[in-house]
Image (spheres, rainbow, N blue to C red):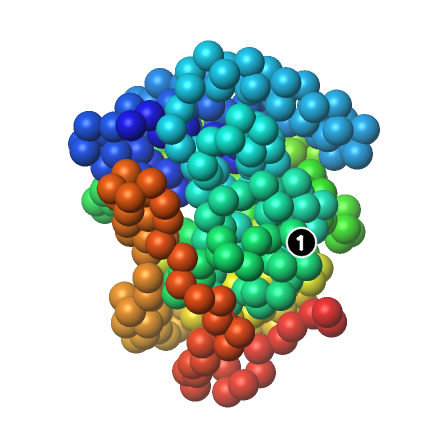
């Protein structure tokens, strides 16, 4: 069977790498497509994958996104008509679902951002089997056009799949000149995302001065963000892609204004603080409720919680890992669905669960004082 996987964002490489390896091991042919965006090709090269580069990211403007997306869908269509895959896989790709639907190729899509409404409306109606974290309210997906007979919740979060084949390696620490458990990792806001409407100034600009004694490895998303942080002395900003999983594994703490690296840190058992300034994702709220993450946009509260988390580092890591170990890995679910499809020509979809909501949990670390932004 030939399986087409469209990878449109850097974290998607980590999400699909285990699926790609396992499909190849089972004798399937894997066709990978990607686009020019955020060091994607460099990351694919790091993993030794063969791929087609089809199109580019359209930038921050609506006009740019529309033109780039239209051009990419046209070019993808020509390639996929020639390649004739049997199945399509994607995660938040706006072009692959429509190409697969137009060519009547069965598809499996994974969605974990219910706030990306514009993008989701280009994905949900055209996806044959939609997988999503159970923390998301199913009605948000139905309102976006998802087929109620083609959706399946996963009791976990996507970044659990990123740990496929992970083996701790301190090489990245030597490359960056930091010590195990002696630094903080930070990630700036996703300013180019179509769902982001926060301020230009990052919350992290006011957090860093409050933690002057700890080296910070920061990952900006744009050159403009990089310039805004150049004034800090305790900051390291890698110039090229690095092994972020090992960096997070050995970090004392993760503080991020985005989502993916925060959840990767949690999957690894690393204490994490979210500083995202907008509406929180359902997955984020769920992780906060279970005590696996703290959220605030107040720099003083963030710095105070950072100090507390670093003091409780060992015991808190044990708690995180005990909860994470009980969750469902999306990679296993996807591979199971592919096997079912190969055997029967259809997917395994359970009856719609009207009770699908947020699993509950609590840890006394925050004493119920997790801060959330107005919805």
Depth check: give the residue in front, 6 or 314: 6
- Residue at 45 percent across and 80 percent down: it is 360
Residue 275 appearing in the image:
no
- Residue at 60 percent across and 33 percent down: it is 98
Q: Is residue 83 left or right of residue 95?
A: left
Seen in the picture, residue 350 relative to 183 is either above or below; the reply is below
Depth check: give the residue in front, 106 or 366: 106
Q: Residues within 10 Å of mark 1 (few under 14, many from 20)?
A: some
Give residue 47's position: percent from left, percent from top: 32, 27
Where is mark 1, residue-wise? Answer: 144
Q: Circle 1 — which element?
A: loop
Q: Is residue 205 left or right of residue 320?
A: right
Give residue 304's position: percent from left, percent from top: 55, 72
The quadrant where residue 270 appears: bottom left
Depth check: give the residue in front, 161 or 134: 134
Give residue 256's position: percent from left, percent from top: 55, 54
Q: Is residue 81 left or right of residue 94?
A: left
In which quadrant of the rendered image does the C terminus lie? bottom right
- Residue at 43 percent across and 81 percent down: it is 361
In which quadrant of the rendered image does the N terminus lie? top left
Q: Is residue 288 left or right of residue 199?
A: left
Give residue 199's position: percent from left, percent from top: 78, 51
């Amino acid at each position: 069977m030939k399986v087409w996987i469209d990878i449109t964002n850097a974290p998607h490489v980590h999400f699909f790498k285990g699926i790609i390896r396992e499909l190849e091991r089972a004798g399937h042919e894997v066709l990978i497509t990607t686009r020019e965006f955020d060091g994607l090709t460099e990351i694919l090269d790091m993993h030794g994958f063969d791929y087609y580069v089809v199109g580019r990211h359209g930038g921050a403007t609506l006009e740019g996104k529309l033109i780039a997306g239209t051009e990419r869908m046209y070019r993808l269509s020509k390639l996929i008509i020639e390649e004739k895959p049997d199945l399509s896989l994607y995660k938040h790709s706006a072009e692959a679902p429509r190409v697969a639907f137009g060519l009547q190729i069965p598809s499996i899509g994974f969605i974990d951002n219910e706030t990306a409404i514009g993008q989701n409306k280009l994905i949900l109606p055209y996806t044959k089997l939609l997988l999503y974290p159970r923390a998301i309210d199913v009605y948000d997906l139905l309102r976006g056009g998802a087929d109620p007979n083609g959706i399946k919740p996963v009791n976990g979060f996507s970044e659990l799949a990123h740990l496929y084949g992970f083996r701790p390696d301190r090489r990245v620490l030597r490359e960056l000149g930091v010590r195990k458990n002696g630094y903080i990792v930070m990630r700036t806001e996703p300013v180019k995302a179509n769902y982001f409407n926060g301020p230009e100034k990052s919350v992290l600009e006011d957090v860093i001065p409050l933690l002057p004694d700890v080296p910070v490895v920061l990952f900006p998303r744009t050159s403009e963000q990089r310039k805004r942080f150049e004034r800090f002395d305790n900051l390291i900003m890698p110039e090229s892609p690095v092994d972020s999983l090992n960096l997070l594994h050995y970090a004392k703490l993760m503080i991020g204004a985005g989502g993916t690296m925060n959840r990767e840190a949690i999957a690894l058992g690393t204490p994490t603080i979210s500083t995202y300034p907008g509406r929180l994702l359902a997955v984020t709220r769920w992780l906060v409720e279970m005590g696996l993450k703290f959220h605030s946009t107040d720099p003083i509260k963030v710095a105070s919680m950072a100090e507390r988390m670093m003091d409780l580092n060992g015991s808190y890591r044990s708690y995180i890992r005990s909860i994470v170990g009980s969750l469902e890995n999306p990679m296993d679910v996807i591979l199971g669905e592919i096997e079912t499809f190969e055997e029967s020509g259809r997917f395994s979809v359970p009856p719609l669960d009207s009770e699908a909501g947020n699993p509950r949990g609590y840890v006394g670390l925050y004493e119920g004082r997790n801060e959330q932004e107005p919805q």
